[in-house]
Image (spheres, rainbow, N blue to C red):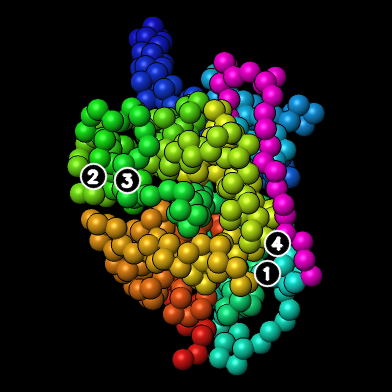
Amino acid sequence: MKRILKLLVLVLVLAFLYFGFTTYPKLDLISGFSAKSVASGHFIDNRSKELIEKTDNDIHMIDLAENTIDDAGKFAVSTVYGLKERKAIYREGLGATLIDDDYDISKPYLLPKRTKLVNNLSFPYGNKEPKDTTFSNIDYAKLKKAVDGSFDGKGQKNKRSRAVVVVYKDKLIAEKYDTGFNKDSKILGWSMTKSITSSAFGVLVQQRKMDIYKPAPIAEWRNDDRKNITVNDLLHMNSGLEWEEDYTKICDATEMLFQAEDMGKVQMDKPAKFKPNTHWYYSSGTTNLLSRILRSQFKTQQEYLDFWYSAVIDKIGMNSMIVEQDMSGIFVGSSYAWATARDWSKFGLLYLHKGNWNGEQVLDESWVKYTATPTNTSNGGYGAQFWLNAGGKFPDAPRDMFYCNGYQGQMVAIIPSLDMVIVRMGVNEGEHYFDFNEFLKEVISSVKK
């Protein structure tokens, strides 16, 4: 009996040590992810805690978190086994922000001044319901089958699509939502936000207020190997700065999103690993650094906050969109934009029409061409904060397709040769779950040649 007890004690000690070395360091990130997800989903999109836990936070390790919501105080708190409590606060107009123990919640803050588009036009150029339009070259039965097939059937939990919107020749030809979601549901775009950030730079270039081919305006880089990195290199994810982005473990990206006060500074402080424009690799830190650079282009915080909306978002009637901030007040340009699926499709249409929005040139046509041109060393897969199909990642989709892409399978696909934009929002991706190539193939094949 004593031997059995000793063995049990040994097993418990080993289990505790294993937990200490493998799981405990991750608890801060787990509770941070969960608190931010719960606060954003609940206060931005009015989702219940139960729905968020079952559909947003049912990720390995994240599902260990225990969450509470304070509706009166407008915040969410998460812990893991009662440890590593993290808090995310909500502010109307700014969304949710994950904070640390040193954050002063009483300090005043500014809100973006927005001018939301209101007119008598139908979607997409207004917010009235789209007019019914039938195209003779669209096989609607085939299109419906393709869209329906992108959602789970009864009792299934595999593809996990939340929204699909298909716009052809400026007309909404297909739209479907999962149970609990509808045309007014705001959905996190994750890394599709990077393309929003790129657009803000496009407007500055159009206004001749920035030369992206000059060295990045970062004083800390002037006297070392980073002095030759340009904004163009950053937009192309080709800066050569050290970075690790692997969401299966603690890395630069996860520490930035769930621990850093100033997210842009994380990448800014990294040393040069390669010469600029010689090695392409994905870095959310780079995009948050770009957002930080944008802030430096304005004299005041208010001008910076307003610009994101007045320059692009509100200009094209993306009235539902909210871009969230980090603790330092900088927009998390890598990851935290929320909008309805219809509004995400409007962003795709802006690029489909080469920067023109209902007669107004919001972005210069040359900027759209720039974003859709493959960057050096990306093998035709990446442009300027947009993904490209030039290298054939999706073999059954046209090579001229370029797209916004986000974690867990968010996509705004822009296909100029078909005059089409396809939006898919969900919480799963991968060929064994949601097969984007097959989905794109089926939707595209509904267009008769």
Q: What residue occupies the far top of the structure in this picture?
A: 2
Res. 214 mark: 3
Q: Amino acid under label 4? A: Lys
Alpha carbons under labels 4 and 2: distance apart: 43 Å
Q: CA distance from mark 1 to mark 4?
A: 16 Å
Quarter where residue 138 is shown: bottom right
Q: Is residue 353 visible?
A: yes
Q: Amino acid at mark 1?
A: Tyr
Give the percent coordinates (x, y) of residue 187: 62, 52
Name the N-terminal-most of marks 2 and 3. 3
N-terminal label among 1 and 2: 1
Instruction: Kindly state the secondary structure of the residue where label 1 is placed.
Output: loop
Residue at image point 35% right, 73% down: 399
Mark 2: which secondary structure? loop
* Amino acid type at image mark 3: Lys
Q: Residue at point 43% right, 62% down? A: 367
Q: Nearer the viewer, residue 181 or 187?
A: 187
Q: Earlier in the sequence, mark 4 or mark 3?
A: 4
Q: Nearer the viewer, mark 4 or mark 3?
A: 3
| Residues rendered magenta in the picture | 98-120
